[in-house]
Image (cartoon, coloured by chain):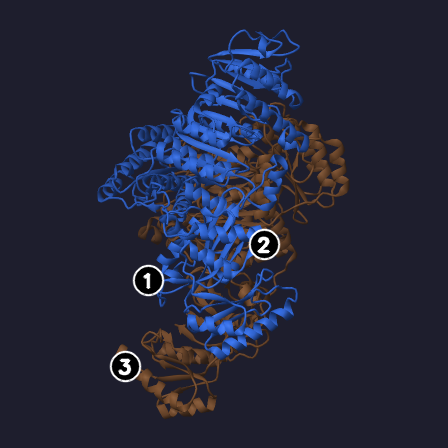
Chain colours: A brown, B blue
């Protein structure tokens, strides 16, 4: 982790060396220098060039060490082949913060990976913190700094959005999109290959940065998912700043494409989605959605409840906005008597005075004024969405002005959608300048409102650290697992898996391992009938396939018969299998079958899985995930979130199942997953759940190592 | 239905009377007249005004009948209170085509509904066809006419999109959106309350209109869903023109909002969606999606297969486009050896020469040229998506020109996404002028490609008319239903419902109605055990609730006991129920339970429903719908489309069920639904389905009248 100070030198340097600058306009080494100079930078710039005496009127130095004064920040724009030399010289000069723009590292394969390793070593030696390589650079709009150390064509307005991106080329598109819309940024960072400073460092920096209120992140690869989750939780709880994330590479083909240009390894997208929700990160599907949500969060107060008023001069778009609102869980406000009376008096008789309010096509600014002021005063309304279509008599600019004015004197959020393009352009410009979030479609406006309200709700919740069960036997579990690993085994069959589970307090039935039929009878009688019998062999993962399972065995005679049958079946089906014995366990009462599991995700580590048994997981993919460790709320919500939850909660004719006991199993499994990294994968399939308060039983389990 | 001729007079009039024109700029009656005059209209315009001598330099007439020449089309802009008088005069003058712009009809309630009725009567009397009332008017860009009989601020470019909209105000927003993007229209119609000419008439007109290649429809209310489906099928099969629909009022709140401004009654949105798919209509969720898909269909050839090549100068957006493509079912093309070799030679070593092709941030036009020409020549590629982000060295306009040139000499589709806004604006403008579909986000581009390919696939299918089962007894079914209706019954219990089903050849088990326990024994023995026994009463719809059902009865003794138990249970639970007897039927073998049903939708009439029994319908809402009558393909696809289909087709460990027999049941039910409008709702719940070729059995049924 990088401390605040080293990042401060990147965003607020008093002096910068641009190492490798040249005189050729249109090339990166030239444009970056000029960008710094023309952005009204508040410090001193020292170009470093082996060839030139001066660039853009500024004196250059041949070597970094030649610079007579101390240097806070170096920007390296040399080719990748000599970057290590430049960095070495930075170290010698005592420069501790560097931006490496140069490409040609990890992203180009073998040789590049070696080069990247080399610069990491040099940075370590000199305690240098650096951004990049392979990035666009850094922008800080704070007037204290006015830094544009990037090759972006233009500097954005000052604002309160902090933006960080793994892709450099995308940054130019984002700036080009944002600038004409007057979307301002506090800091704007392209961090490229993140060989040193990562998104995590930048997120923490933004947490403490007073200029940043809303944080936007574009990632192609989540290297350390847990660190990202922790950072998000810290930021939201300590600074109440929303974090919006766009993550590409969601399909396997997309992930492959991402890998081929960043060399990244993608985890499961479903797990990523669950983790983001757990951490309170707002995940977006497109850039447009990201900015649509960001401008609402940035420029308007959060709605305190979800009852929205829609005002429109065209019925159709009002309906579209309503449809979108309802789909997002937003309610249409029911106006008070007072508001209704006001509208009845002040709006024409043809107007629709109910929500959505239709002020009718020929509405001028006065009607919009009446409607907007009216709904905002209504205590049943938590925010207003204003739609305008350009009719020949519509006072577009005037209405934009009025909306801005009314919104500015109000503590409820107001968003607008002026539909069309050419005619409404100047009106939209007015709204954007006055920071009224504007949307090209009414549907986007409804969706942004929903997003802001969800964030408001989220701020009210505080993250509770997962508790710890004291009654577990970590040592016992570790012994079983380590022993298996020592013997190079990849798989623990049920007999051993249940011992691990039992050590963590999971409801394992009474059981034993029989190595003869008389042994089997003895164990069965000790346990009490009915019992189940299953083959135990490292070579047999799916025990039913070769006929290795017998259920509901009721007496001695059946035990004996089952024992012989299983041995015979298995010996025939898998002649090479080493049969360790027959696992005998108390048969669980009938109940609802659910599946619990542990998986390991390359980005997020141990993950807990939950679903209903059989077809629900296989056919409907009705599964929930959470990154371990779980707190009570997470365990409970992952049960409630599956589509089939009504089968557990008790719908018509069904009896409520003991979800409390499932919750405890999930929590114990989560602790096991955290304590025992030896477990690569664990399945309890099924866990049989009884009626409420009646508990549950592990009816089958296996562990992959 | 209106014939082509009456619509021809609307789009291609040789003379127009503008009735109610005035001299006040910014008002509808003035602006419409001026719009016609300034659009270079090819006919003669006659303003009619009781007050003015001339308007905008054109001589006016006091009364319509004063016009000395014949008039093809009248545009009425008088207030609604006098519209009927104007229309009467049109009739007297012999004008047979009219556009009624005036608002204040059905949409304003009681008085308006009466006014609308009145003008419909007058139109009928004089055989007048009219568009409106309550609309924006009509635009025809065909140079033969050059008609802008609307109060839209601007006339769009000539093009091949035919656009019709129920909402007038929305039209202005659409034009304002389309005009700067050079999206051209053939005809543009706001048809308002559709009191006479409806979307169906206009659709058929567009079918025959050579200028129209792609049809866009915005509706708030589908009045006659079947006519819409028929029109769509006719148009697609006869003219291969795609139809895109945006329908608002999808949620019940949205539908209420729509109702309050058009007085429309909405059917189920799910049924609407199913009907659109059946008819081949491309349903869109937003205007943006509609135009995104429309420009691809309009301006570029259809892809002949779904293997797409993506070209980009920034990795991130390439990944986003890939993700979106995969999600939409599009494949990333695998380049041929030749293409790969070409790229290896001609692109820099840092470029990614696999798909998505990354020509790298510093790419100029030459690299785009190599990449785009290369992929289009590759026989493994069916279309190309080109992404550009504005880097400082990017030749934006030049690249736009090259893309346009290459695309124009190629028969594979090429779309582009130049990301950003300000810097890329002129490049985008070049693309739009040259009719290269342009998308603000790469994701939209992928989605549009998928849409075009789906339409290509659809054109290859031809609609097969549903067959008819000859072995049905329509008379018998009609008798039972009519008899019940005559007796004012609302509900047919199982005993009668199965008789109706049997008449239509559905697999009803052997059964009988017992009115005494000895009767019951006799019937049971005739049928053969095991049997089921259920109470029959018009007052009891859910027979299980009062204990009115006994299953799996195996002998005489059990029959007697069950008979007494049912009578006792029901008499106690529902003392007022008139018990008609006990229904006795052969108990079906165990099997997979499915639900079949008939519903009636206010827009689409009889609809057939299918789903798996129990929780699948209740919890997962895993249901498919089709508008009756069904053809074989529709019956088969509605079974395959549910999520739980693998349970019927036989997944791991499950045996394939007799889906052929379900298909036949659906087809027979469809015929029953069409033949017997008396049936308001019918449920077969469950139909028990056996293994493949083993048939199925109706295990319970009821009919609502």
Would you name the residue on which mark 2 appears?
B489
Distance (Cα) linking label 2 and label 1: 38 Å
Would you name the residue on which mark 3 appears?
A571
Specify whether disc 3 shares its chain with disc 2.
no
The residue closer to the viewer here, B404 or B235, is B235
Q: Is residue A325 above or below residue B420?
A: below
Q: Nearer the viewer, mark 2 or mark 1?
A: 2
The residue closer to the viewer here, B600 or A573, is B600
The residue closer to the viewer here, B560 or A349, is B560
Label 2: how many residues lie within 10 Å, few (<14), some (14-19) or many (20+)? Answer: some
Q: Is residue B391 visible?
A: no
Q: Position of residue A372 (x, y in %)?
A: 69, 36
What chain is tagged by disc 2? Answer: B
Q: Is residue B521 left or right of residue A309?
A: left
The residue closer to the viewer here, B254 or A621, is B254
Q: Nearer the viewer, mark 3 or mark 2?
A: 2
Label 1: how many residues lie within 10 Å, few (<14), some (14-19) or many (20+)? Answer: few
Question: Farthest left residue?
Answer: B338
Q: Is residue B297 visible?
A: yes
Distance (Cα) linking label 3 and label 1: 36 Å
Q: What secondary structure is found at the residue carrying circle 1?
A: loop
Would you name the residue on which mark 1 appears?
B693
């Amino acid at each position: 982790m990088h401390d605040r100070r080293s990042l401060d030198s990147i965003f607020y340097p008093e002096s910068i060396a641009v190492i490798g600058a040249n005189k050729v306009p249109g090339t990166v080494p030239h444009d970056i220098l000029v960008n710094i100079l023309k952005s009204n930078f508040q410090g001193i710039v020292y170009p470093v060039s082996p060839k030139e005496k001066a660039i853009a009127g500024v004196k250059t130095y041949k070597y970094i060490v030649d610079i007579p004064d101390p240097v806070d920040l170096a920007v390296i724009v040399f080719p990748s082949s000599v970057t290590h030399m430049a960095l070495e010289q930075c170290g010698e000069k005592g420069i501790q913060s560097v931006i490496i723009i140069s490409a040609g590292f990890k992203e180009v394969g073998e040789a590049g990976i070696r080069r990247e390793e080399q610069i990491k070593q040099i940075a370590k030696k000199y305690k240098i913190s650096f951004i990049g390589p392979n990035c666009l650079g850094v922008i800080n709009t704070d007037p204290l700094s006015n830094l544009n150390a990037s090759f972006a064509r233009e500097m954005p307005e000052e604002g309160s959005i902090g933006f960080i991106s793994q892709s450099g080329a995308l940054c130019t598109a984002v700036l080009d999109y944002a600038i004409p819309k007057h979307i301002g940024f506090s800091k704007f960072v392209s961090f490229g290959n993140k060989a040193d400073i990562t998104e995590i460092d930048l997120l923490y920096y933004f947490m403490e940065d007073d200029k940043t209120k809303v944080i936007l992140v574009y990632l192609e690869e989540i290297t350390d998912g847990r660190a990202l989750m922790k950072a998000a939780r810290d930021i939201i709880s300590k600074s109440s700043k929303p974090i919006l994330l766009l993550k590409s590479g969601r399909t396997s083909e997309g992930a492959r494409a991402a890998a081929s240009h960043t060399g990244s390894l993608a985890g499961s997208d479903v797990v990523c989605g669950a983790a983001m929700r757990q951490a309170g990160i707002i995940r977006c599907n497109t850039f447009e959605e990201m900015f649509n949500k960001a401008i609402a969060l940035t420029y308007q107060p959060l709605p305190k409840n979800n009852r929205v008023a829609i005002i429109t001069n065209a019925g159709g778009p009002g309906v579209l906005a309503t449809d979108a609102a309802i789909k997002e869980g937003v309610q249409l406000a029911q106006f008070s008597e007072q508001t209704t009376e006001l509208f009845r008096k002040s709006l024409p008789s043809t107007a629709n005075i109910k929500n959505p309010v239709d002020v009718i096509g020929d509405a001028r600014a006065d009607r919009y004024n009446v409607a907007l002021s009216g709904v905002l005063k209504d205590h049943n309304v938590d925010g207003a969405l204003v739609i305008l279509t350009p009719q020949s008599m519509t006072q577009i600019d005037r209405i934009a002005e009025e909306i801005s004015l009314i919104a500015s004197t109000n503590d409820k959020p107001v968003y607008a959608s002026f539909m069309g393009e050419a005619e409404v352009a100047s009106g939209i410009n007015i709204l954007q300048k006055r920071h009224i979030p504007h949307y090209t479609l009414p549907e986007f406006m409804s969706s942004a409102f929903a997003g802001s309200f969800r964030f408001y709700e989220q701020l009210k919740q505080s993250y509770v650290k997962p508790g710890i069960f004291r009654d577990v036997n970590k040592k016992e579990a570790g012994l079983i697992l380590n022993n298996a690993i020592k013997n190079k085994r990849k798989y623990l069959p049920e007999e051993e898996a249940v011992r691990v589970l039992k050590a963590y307090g999971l409801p394992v039935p009474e059981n034993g391992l029989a190595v003869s039929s008389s042994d089997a009878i003895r164990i069965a009688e000790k346990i009490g009938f009915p019992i189940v019998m299953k083959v135990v062999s490292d070579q047999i993962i799916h025990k039913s396939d070769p006929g290795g399972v017998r259920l509901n065995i009721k007496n001695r005679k059946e035990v004996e018969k089952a024992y012989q049958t299983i041995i015979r079946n298995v010996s025939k089906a898998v002649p090479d299998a080493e049969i360790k014995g027959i696992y005998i366990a108390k048969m669980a009462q009938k109940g609802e079958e659910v599946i619990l599991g542990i998986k390991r995700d390359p980005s997020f580590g141990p993950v807990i899985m939950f679903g209903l048994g059989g077809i629900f997981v296989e056919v409907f993919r009705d599964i929930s995930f959470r990154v371990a460790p779980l707190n009570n709320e997470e365990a409970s919500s992952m049960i409630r979130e599956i589509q089939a939850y009504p089968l557990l909660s008790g719908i018509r004719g069904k009896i409520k199942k003991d979800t409390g006991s499932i919750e405890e199993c999930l929590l114990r499994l989560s602790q096991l997953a955290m304590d025992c990294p030896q477990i690569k994968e664990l399945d309890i399939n099924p866990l049989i759940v009884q009626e409420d308060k009646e508990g549950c039983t592990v009816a089958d389990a296996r562990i992959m190592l």
